[in-house]
Image (cartoon, rainbow, N blue to C red):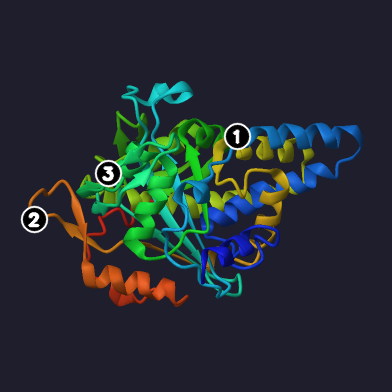
Amino acid sequence: MTEQSKSGRTGGARHGRRRKPPTRRRRAARVLLSTGAAVLVLGGAGAGYVYARLDGNLQGVDINGQLGADRPDDVDDGSLDLLVLGSDSRSGANAAYGKDEGGARSDTAMVVHVHQGHRKASVVSIPRDTLVDRPACTDEHGIAVPAAHRAMFNTAYEVGGPACAVKTVEALSGIRMDHYIEVDFTGFRHLIDELGGVEITTTRPIKDAKSHLDLAPGTHTLDGEQSLGLVRTRKSVGDGSDLGRIQLQQAFMKAFVEQVRSVGVLTDPTKLLGLADAATKAITPDSELDSVPELMSFAKGLSGIGADNVHMVTLPVEYDPVDPNRVVPLEAQSRQLWTALAKDLPIPASAVKDTATGKADGIVK
């Protein structure tokens, strides 16, 4: 379809077409963002105050405006694709997590594909150390960023911001991203603390001084700082690569979703408001989701996805023969994966079999 069909789907009736609920991460967002809807019916002048407070937390990024028409075609099949990034910015409140070197990178990247019918979702984690052909793009200040061969995936965000990250994912996958959501370190930590922590069970010790993490085997309720450490740790799991960390992130997201479901936020107005406030502060969405009404409208379509209907995989990669500290996509299997999602089909097991997926399985239950 044309660029106009995309805007028709996301503008006016903008969430009508591919508005599918993303994945676990998205299901969690559904519950947290729905809190805004419940808060707004608490009544009176307070509702107006709450609305303004939550709306004021949101600052959007005009991805469509920056990328223009040079993008994959929009396919009107009832599915939805979005890019979820975790930013490793060291500026501002995030300075506690390392030196500010003048640019942020996408520490975590997940492509969420919500299948037609709003009942199932597939999530593809992209290792940040993946070597890709990064396309030329324009950053948020209108400055041209040249293309690069064999560039690390996470440098796209570093040199060009969200729009360049989206364009790199679209070039890699051949699939147009309908939405973009970014979560930063500080917002993530505050959100977990507001939730009351997330319960996980470890089968082996996890100790990483850089991630401020020291867990003995057993069941733990992780606070925000510990949760952030868990999803960032590398050296203490599997082969010490980003691939092992990805599997920890995926395991944590499952636990996070279950925790959100078990807390009962809709029966506790105080917790409801606190979670809504933390959630809207934690994210930077694209400009089509940067208001409470837009987020709530988008979130309504997410309720049909259960945790058991989310399939999480890692992009099929192998260690780079030139630099073993980097990985490169397995061309045939990656194409099989992206083609399946482009056709709104399940990811075939053969696409992710026998790839360098890391060895974090079994560390966290």
Q: Check disc 1 and report the residue beneath it.
A: 281
Q: Are marks 3 and 2 in contact (CB under 8 Å)?
A: no
Q: Find residue 45 and report its image quarter.
A: top right
Q: Check disc 2 and report the residue beneath it.
A: 321
- Residue 195 position, x and y percent, is 61, 39
Q: Answer above or below: position of 201 versus 111.
A: above
- Give the position of the C terminus as an image quadrant: bottom left
- Circle 3 crowding by C-alpha within 10 Å: few under 14, some 14–19, many from 20: few
Q: Tell me which numbered mark, 3 or 2, is placed earlier along the sequence.
A: 3
- Circle 1 crowding by C-alpha within 10 Å: few under 14, some 14–19, many from 20: many
| Element type where label 2 sits in the image | loop
| Element type where label 3 sits in the image | loop
Q: Amino acid at mark 1?
A: Lys
Alpha-carbon span between mark 1 and mark 2: 42 Å
Q: Is residue 68 left or right of residue 148?
A: right
Q: Answer above or below: position of 98 versus 276.
A: above
Q: How many marks?
A: 3
| Element type where label 1 sits in the image | helix
Foreground of the two, 47 or 242: 47
Residue 205 shows up from this direction:
no
Q: Check disc 3 and report the residue beneath it.
A: 146
Q: Nearer the viewer, mark 3 or mark 2?
A: 3
- Residue 198 position, x and y percent, is 53, 43
